[in-house]
Image (spheres, rainbow, N blue to C red):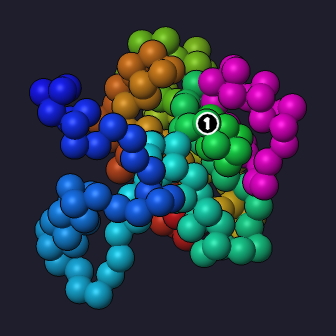
């Protein structure tokens, strides 16, 4: 299998063009999504995808300057994704190189080792309250978006409580935040 792939395509970047499997994937994605006359942008990594999402969000909310993310998160190695990542190394790198956006961090909901020192049955989903508090502190008009992980990977394979994202979505919708 490796030999076959090496004979077919040993190096590729979308900067120079597209290959047949990539074009077929783009067509399939458009077909599945039901969009006509749309375009698909294929990147090389999750960093590309997340950086693109951050740029689109910033373009949509041009006058906003702050992006909310989680402590312990990892969103990529580009300038914007490094800024919003909450891993210690990413935070250090971002402080050295700077960024085109600001980031504030909310604790990720880790009920087993609660970053707020609370117990699951009595915390009242305080991690969602932390996001609301961050929004209030910086002003909802200044928040570009929130980027998070459905399961925090590099931060320790942390699965949030069942209703976390439902409650979080409610806070974001009330404040009209992406």
Tell which of 6 and 114 is nearer to you.
6
Q: Say which residue appears at 77% left-offset and 29% top-offset.
A: 93
In screen coordinates, is 4 left or right of 128?
left
Q: Residue furthest bottom?
A: 37
Instruction: Tell me the magenta residue range.
Output: 86-105
In screen coordinates, is 39 left or right of 129?
left
Q: How many marks?
A: 1
Instruction: Please provide percent x and percent y for residue 11.
Output: 39, 41
In screen coordinates, is 66 left or right of 42?
right
Q: Give the labeled residue for mark 1.
A: 77
Q: Say which residue appears at 57% left-offset and 52% top-offset.
A: 51
In screen coordinates, is 139 left or right of 10?
right
Tell which of 60 and 32 is nearer to you.
32
Q: Say which residue appears at 58% left-offset and 66% top-offset.
A: 57
Using a 10 Å C-alpha cutoff, classify the residue at mark 1 as few (fewer than 14 neighbours), some (14 to 19) or many (20 or more): some
Instruction: Please provide percent x and percent y for residue 137.
Output: 77, 51
Q: Please, is residue 124 above or below residue 22 in the view? A: above
Q: Please, is residue 35 above or below residue 152 in the view? A: below
Q: Say which residue appears at 35% left-offset and 62% top-offset.
A: 18
Asked if the magenta segment contains residue 102, the reply would be: yes
Instruction: Please provide percent x and percent y for residue 106.
Output: 62, 36
Instruction: Please provide percent x and percent y for residue 13.
Output: 44, 50
Q: Is residue 162 visible?
A: yes
Q: Is residue 133 visible?
A: no
The N terminus, quarter of image: top left
Q: Residue furthest top?
A: 113
Query: Tag 1's secondary structure?
Result: loop
């Amino acid at each position: 299998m490796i030999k076959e792939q090496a004979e077919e395509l040993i190096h590729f970047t979308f900067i120079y063009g597209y290959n047949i499997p990539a074009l077929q994937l783009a067509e399939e994605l458009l077909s599945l999504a039901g969009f006509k006359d749309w375009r698909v942008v294929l990147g090389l990594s999750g960093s590309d995808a997340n950086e693109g999402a951050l740029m689109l969000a910033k373009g949509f909310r041009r006058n906003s300057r702050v992006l909310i993310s989680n402590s312990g998160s990892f969103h990529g190695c580009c300038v914007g994704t490094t800024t919003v990542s909450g891993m210690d190394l990413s935070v250090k790198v971002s402080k050295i190189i700077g960024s085109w956006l600001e980031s504030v961090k909310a604790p990720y909901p880790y009920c087993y080792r609660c970053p707020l020192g609370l117990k699951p049955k009595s915390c009242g989903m305080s991690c969602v309250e932390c996001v609301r508090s961050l929004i209030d502190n910086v002003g909802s008009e200044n928040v570009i978006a929130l980027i998070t992980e459905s399961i925090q990977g590099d931060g320790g394979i942390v699965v949030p409580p069942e209703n976390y994202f439902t409650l979080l979505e409610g806070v974001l919708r009330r404040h009209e935040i992406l």
